[in-house]
Amino acid sequence: MSAALPASGREWHLVARPHGWPKAEDFALREAPVAAPGEGRVLVRNRYFSVDPYMRGRMNDVKSYIPPFKLDRPMDGGAVGEVIASNAEGIEVGDHVLHGLGWREYADVPAEHAVKVDPSIAPLSAYLGVLGMTGLTAYAGLFDVASFKEGDAVFVSGAAGAVGSQVGQMAKLRGASRVIGSAGSDEKVELLVEEYGFDAAFNYKNGPVADQLREAAPDGIDVYFDNVGGEHLEAAISALNPHGRVTVCGMIAQYNATEPTPGPRNLALVIGKRLRIQGMLVGDHSDLQPQFVQEVAGWLASGELKYRETTVEGIENGFDAFLGLLRGENTGKMIVSLA
């Protein structure tokens, strides 16, 4: 066990289900008691927690691949922190662990759901991004789901985000013939080309996506990694070469829509081009975790793989960080720091 524990800590609760864009009054930051952990559990002082686009869907009370957040209960999500009390074998006070009880200062975590991480290999926050769920999403979505092979031309939407920026770099590291990215500002476009090594990039707000993609990929594309949906997916279907593959990872363009959004109008092209469009959930690919960590840690150590994080300080700014993520105000992984 441990020395004196805090009496209470703050945690974010969902208090109303958002209609369209989330509003501040849909959330509440509340004080909750902190107690010593029971048998087989550890108490973690969270240092960082993750805000991710998928969380918007969990705020709706609809049947989905992951249960909705409960009202008037703490929300959850990826977090990393330091163990301050342990009632479990194999995890000591002072260990650092990755777990799923974010959005709070202190987490009472079952030991089997806490994964020890090494802060000497990479900064703790990296385990929420480039070495965590977002990195594995990029890795599995590109190499497994999209069946990437050397020489493929790859297009990534939301390319300056946490997942997209990794997809483009991983494709280059494995021998892509050309990597194209789209992003929502000229600054992000410059980042994609200058820092992440994309061959071409464009600002989707500067004109029709289809026209800009055609110019950036005159010979077409073989793989499309979709984080956006909507107009981007339609443009990619037009640009894909025969036997092209699409990994549908996210559709942030419609997460806050209150009316049904139109689907791509050119889906008939899927037939003649023999395209494959496949959705993905990172949880299906945990078998790749050891291989992923080994390969990506090597790329990080050599400096070949670069990553950015947008850090928002303080638990009281958790909702603002989430809203900023949905608006595209982050570059790379959006993280809330409690350190």
Image (cartoon, rainbow, N blue to C red):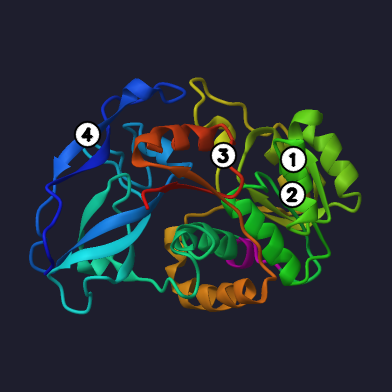
Q: Which mark is residue 30?
A: 4
**What residue sits 9% from the left and 53% below the top?**
35
Residue 269 visible in the snapshot:
no
Residue 154 visible in the snapshot:
yes
Please identify the quadrant where the N terminus is shown.
Answer: bottom left
**Residue at numbered disc 1:** 187
For this view, does 184 lie left or right of residue 56?
Answer: right
Q: Calculate the distance from the C-alpha at mark 4 to the C-alpha at mark 3.
A: 31 Å
Q: Specify the amino acid type for callout 4.
A: Arg
**Figure label count:** 4
Question: Does residue 90 lie above or below 55 as drawn?
Answer: below
Q: Whole-percent x and y of residue 128?
A: 45, 58
**Residue at numbered disc 2:** 191
Question: Does residue 123 lie above or below 208 as drawn?
Answer: below
Question: Which residue occupies the foreground of this view, 110 or 140?
Answer: 110
Element class at badge 1: helix
Q: Calculate the distance from the C-alpha at mark 2 to the C-alpha at mark 3.
A: 22 Å
Are the residues at dot 2 and dot 1 in contact (C-beta closer than 8 Å)? yes
Q: Specify the amino acid type for callout 3.
A: Met
Give the mark nearest the N terminus, 4 or 1.
Answer: 4
Q: Which mark is residue 251?
A: 3
Q: Which residues are magenta?
A: 142-148
**What residue sits 63% from the left and 32% below the top?**
263
